[in-house]
Image (spheres, rainbow, N blue to C red):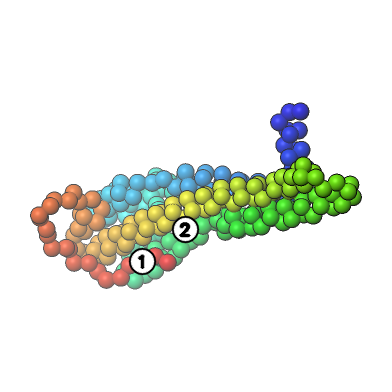
Amino acid sequence: MGFFGEFLDFLHRGGFAMYALLLLSVVSLGIVLERLYFFSRQHSDPTQLLKEIGERVAKDDMNGAIAVCDRHRGMLPKILQFGLYRHEKSRADISDALSIALLEQLNQLEANLPIIGTVAVIAPFVGLFGTVLGIIRAFNDIALKGNSTPAVVAAGVSEALITTAAGLIIAVVAVIFFNYFKSRIKAYNQEMIVAANKLAEMLAFHNAGAPIPTELYTPRKPQPGLGSAPAPRPSGGPTGH
């Protein structure tokens, strides 16, 4: 018997619940692969992106700043471009636009994750349900055969516990990936909020006709013992939700 035959025999021994668990595992695996592919396409260097945008905004080259966003992949360039298209608006309008863009992208980040969370919760219960059915079937067989030796009972119970083991394995894997994606979403969200606030400040300084502080788009190297007064900042800015 080959691997495929053994797999079918394994499913058959677990009964109906095993087929339900197989469906849950296929659905969760498909979502995990889709999310891994999605996140692999979101890589962008916010420091380099802000540097290129800031240099062009400082030169009043808004078209160039928008073109920079087109050259970078991921969600962050789209969010910043959303604000750049409204660079002539007030600080409040720019901040509102960036907040809307952030919320839209956050929804894309969290797409399908509730399904993985649901699989993680219900898989053990489906496995337990299969075990209960298996034990009922095992005791029915014992009653029909009139044989209740430990070997017969152990064989029936061991087959019934297959679904519990399968349900726990599926749940553990689903929880691992659910937490992994949640941590990546949190990191991306914080990264995008910081970048959006910096862009809003750049545009506010630009619209006010004031020089744009280079620290908004150029990372400063820490110098212990030295400090400088922060540049005045216009109030307001996009916030995280």
Q: How many labels does the image show?
A: 2
Residue in the picture at 60% in, 47% down: 169
Tag of residue 238: 1
Q: What residue type is labelled 2?
A: Gln
* Above/below status of 175 relative to 104: above
Labelled disc at residue 49: none
Mark pair 1, 2: CA separation: 14 Å
**Is 69 situated left or right of 174 in this image?**
left
Q: In this view, does 132 lie to the left or right of 117?
A: right
Few, some or many C-alpha atoms within 10 Å of disc 1 (few <14, some 14-19, many ≥20)?
Answer: many
The residue under the point 77% across, 42% down is: 151
- Identified by mark 1, the residue type is Pro
Secondary structure of the residue carrying tag 2 is helix
In the displayed structure, does residue 104 sit left or right of residue 227? right
Which residue in the protein does label 2 denote? 105
Which quadrant holds the N terminus? top right
Furthest-front residue in view? 149
Relative placement, left or right, of 102 versus 3 is left
Q: Residue 229: which quarter of the image?
A: bottom left
Q: In the rendered view of the protein, which quadrant contains the C terminus?
A: bottom left
Q: Position of residue 42 (x, y in %)?
A: 44, 47
Residue at the extreme left of the image, as rendered: 225
Q: Can residue 81 be seen in this view?
A: no
Q: In the displayed image of the protein, which residue is found farthest to the top?
A: 1
Q: Where is residue 61 in the image (x, y as percent from the top left)?
A: 29, 53
- Say above or below: 208 vs 11: below
